[in-house]
Structure formats: C-alpha cells, structure tokens
Image (tube, rainbow, N blue to C red):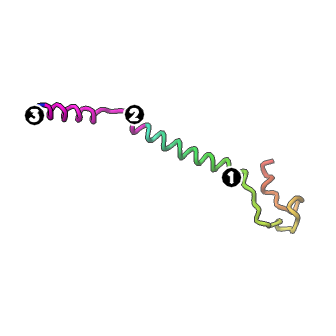
Amino acid sequence: MPDTVDTAAALLAAAAQEGPGDTLRIVLLVSIVGGALLAWFLLRGYRTDDSGDAGAAGGTGDGPGGNTDRDASA
C-alpha cells in the first residue's frame, strides 16, 4: 500500500506546480485574435465596391461626379 500513497503524493505535487501554461494560452489567444483583426483592418482598404453605382451625379466614376471614395487615400 505504500506505493499508492507515494504515487498519489507525487501526482498531487506535480499538479500543484505553477507554470506558464495559463499565461501562454492567453498570449496565444490574444495574438490570434489580434492577427485576425489586423488582417481584417489591412485588407478592408483593398476592397473594391463593384456595385455598379456610378455616383450620385451620374458620372462614369472617373470624373468629379463619380465615385471617389476608393481614391480617398491616394
């Protein structure tokens, strides 16, 4: 019976050890979510609006009456 007591004591001692497990899980989760948000933020700037709307003034999209929203950052 002493083997069982020693084994149980060793298992309890191993379970009580503190380690970086929770911290690493949090860092990994935050980095994945942050990477996804960063990718969304960067890629939304390259989105094109191909809805066929030529603008409120009826222009072709290239002139002053056209859709100039996509060229706002240029």
- Whole-angstrom CA distance, mark 3 to mark 2, is 34 Å
Question: Disc 1 designates what residue?
Answer: 44
Nearer to us in this view, 67 or 15: 15
Q: Which corner quadrant of the image does residue 35 belong to?
A: top right
Task: Tell me which residue sits at (86%, 68%) in the image.
Answer: 57
Question: Disc 3 designates what residue?
Answer: 1
Q: Which mark is residue 20?
A: 2
> Considering only vertical position in the picture, is 44 above or below 57?
above
Task: Tell me which residue sits at (88%, 58%) in the image.
Answer: 62
Q: Which corner quadrant of the image does residue 3 belong to?
A: top left
> Mark 2 or mark 3, which is nearer the start of the sequence?
3
The reply, left or right, for residue 55 in relation to residue 32 is right
Q: Which mark is residue 53?
A: none
What's the amino acid at mark 1? Arg
Q: Residue 70 placed where, x, y %?
A: 78, 55
10 Å crowding of disc 1: few (<14), some (14-19), many (20+): few
10 Å crowding of disc 3: few (<14), some (14-19), many (20+): few
